[in-house]
Each structure stands twice: as C-alpha cells, then as structure tokens.
Image (spheres, grey):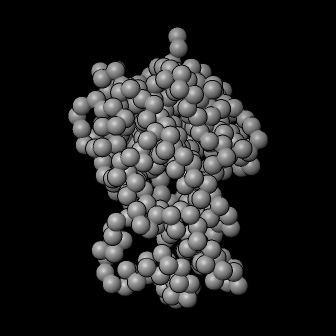
Amino acid sequence: MHPLVSVIVPVYRVERYLEEAVESILSQTLSNIEIILVDDGSDDRCPEICDRFQKEYENIVVIHQRNHGLPAARNVGINKANGKYIAFCDSDDIMKKDMLERMVLAAQNHHADIVMCGYETFPDKKNVYPGIKSDAVLTPNTFIAKCNTIHTGNELCFSWRFLLKKKYIEEKKIRFDEDLLFGEDVPFNIQAVMEASRIFVLQEILYFYRTNNINSIMRTKYKPNLGELVQRQYQKKIELTYQYHLDKIDAWMEDLAYYYITAFADMLFNNAMNGPVEKQKEAVKKIIRMPLLSNNFQKCKGRLFHRGRINAIFWIACWWKIDWIVWLFVKNKYGL
C-alpha cells in the first residue's frame, strides 16, 4: 500500500533534537505515512540515529549523501517520496500529533493542492496564525490578494507549514533551488502557491518551530557571505514576481520592498557589526548599495517614514547613500 503522506526531514548536525523530531512524526494520529530522513553529510551522531530509526520502523527510509545543503536534501526527499501528499519537518522541530490528519482531511474535503496551517514558536510559545483569513478554497490570485503583508508577515517563509499534493508538484516541476542556501523556502513556496489550482488555509496551530537551536544558520552570530546569500534569494524572488505577473499587484510590490529594506537591512547591518572591526565601515557602505535596498526605497511609498523623525533621517541617508550618516547610526545601534 502506498503511503498517504511522505514526510521529508533534512538532517544535518541536529543530534540533540533529531530523536524528538522523528518521534513527533511517528506519533501522528494519521498512520499511513512514510518518513524520509535525508542525512546531508552530518558529521555528528545523526547518521547512526537515522540508521537506528530505519531498523526499528519499516516506514522510515534513510538516505545518506555528501553535504549539499538543505535545498538539495529536500529535493532528494521529494524525488524519493511515494505519498499522495508531501510534508516537510525540520529536524529540530516538532509536529503536533494531529497535524497530518488535520491537513490531509482539509485537502481531501476541499480537493486542495495545498493546505496551509499556523505554528507556535518554542520555547517562547508565540502563536503565529496565517495572515490569510478565509474559510473557503482560494485560487493563487485570491490567496495573494487576501494578505497585504504577505512578505512582512512571513506568510511564505516556511515550507513545513504546507501540505502539498505530490502529483501537481511533479507535473509543475516544482523543486527547491539548490543554488540558494539562505531563505530557500520562499521561492519554492511562491511557485507552489502560484502553480496550484486550489488552496485551503487552516487557522490552526499544528507545528512547533524551535527558535533556540544554536547551530541554526539563523542563529549564527556572523556570516561572512550573508550579503551574497540574501541578494541571491532576492534576485530569485524578483524573477518569480515577474514570471507570475505579481509586479502588477501594488500591495505585493510595496510590502516586498518594505520587507527587504527593514528586515534584511537590519539583519545585514547587525551581521556587519559582528564581523572584523577593520572591515565594518566598508561593509556598511556596501550594504546600502545592494540592489535589494537601493532598488526598493521609492516603492515603499512613504511607509518607511511613519516611524519617527530619527528613523526617517536614517532611511533618507541610506536612500541617498550618505555614508557617514549611515555609519554613525549603524555604529550607535549595533556597535559592540
């Protein structure tokens, strides 16, 4: 019998959390599932933990490969999957016991290609519900139109909050871009949403997202190539924006611009000030000239300047590339 759901779990340096993650999938109230553990060249105890699970449970498949990154690991899992539906679980997170049952039921009842749910961060216990409020089946365009903060609200940031029908993923040739090693979920999710025929959103918390894994790339204090990684993701997002004619939607473009200028500028400036002291000033200068910032100021339509005079001065200085003012602000805010 073919499994109803294939759960893909990329594994890399998570020996502390892996067993808890896998146990949460094994404990699902939906029994007809397969679990695909993709060991992406992990150099800790993860490979032996994966093999032990495979020996104990006949519905667990283990794939060992050289380290190629998260997107490649997920693609290998998709290619191997036998389920009617595909779900993702990060190897340091936890699925709620009835997550798959609830999402499959919604997919079946509404003949949906994609089902979306909410999640809770832990250990801080913050509930995040979908910003798309609807109890009806949505088309891609209505999905986008339902949320004016689709970027700033991180609605498309995590693939593990979606259940996807395998047949349409294969027909539309949707895969993770293996050249993206930062924010790779977003382009995949944009394609998945825009290529779907029917989308259903569940206003339920069904996944637990860990925020205190010190080995996560998001928690790494300084990443030398962060600017390059973020810019690459931005470029892919822009390509998809034009491919699906999302550039015609003002709310999409404005929120996209605001998201990159605020969230990513903050991330990049903070990263620069955690780098080598002798390179900090030049790094800040380089950041304000990156296309993901310089191309987006005008598109924000004044939204940047509604948070006080000081904030407005800072963004104007970034916009006009007044280096010394930007440097003073950044040094004061992020300097150690």
Q: Residue at x 49, y 44 (%)?
A: 242
In the rendered structure, the answer to whether residue 158 lies left or right of residue 279 reads left
Residue 324 in the image: state x and y as whole percent: 55, 88
Q: Residue at x 52, y 49 (%)?
A: 237
Residue 310 in the image: state x and y as whole percent: 37, 85
Total marks shown come to 0
Looking at the picture, does residue 171 appear above or below residue 195?
A: above
Residue 205 in the image: state x and y as whole percent: 33, 43
Quarter of the image where the C terminus is located: bottom right
In the rendered structure, the answer to whether residue 12 lies left or right of residue 202 reads right
Looking at the picture, does residue 265 appear above or below residue 8?
A: below
Residue that protrudes farthest toward the left in the picture:
135
Q: Residue at x 50, y 20 (%)?
A: 167
Residue that protrudes farthest toward the right in the picture:
66
Q: Is any atom of residue 245 visible in this view? A: yes
Residue 252 in the image: state x and y as whole percent: 37, 51
Q: Is any atom of residue 334 visible in this view? A: no
Q: Nearer the viewer, residue 36 or 161?
A: 161
Q: Residue at x 58, y 34 (%)?
A: 175
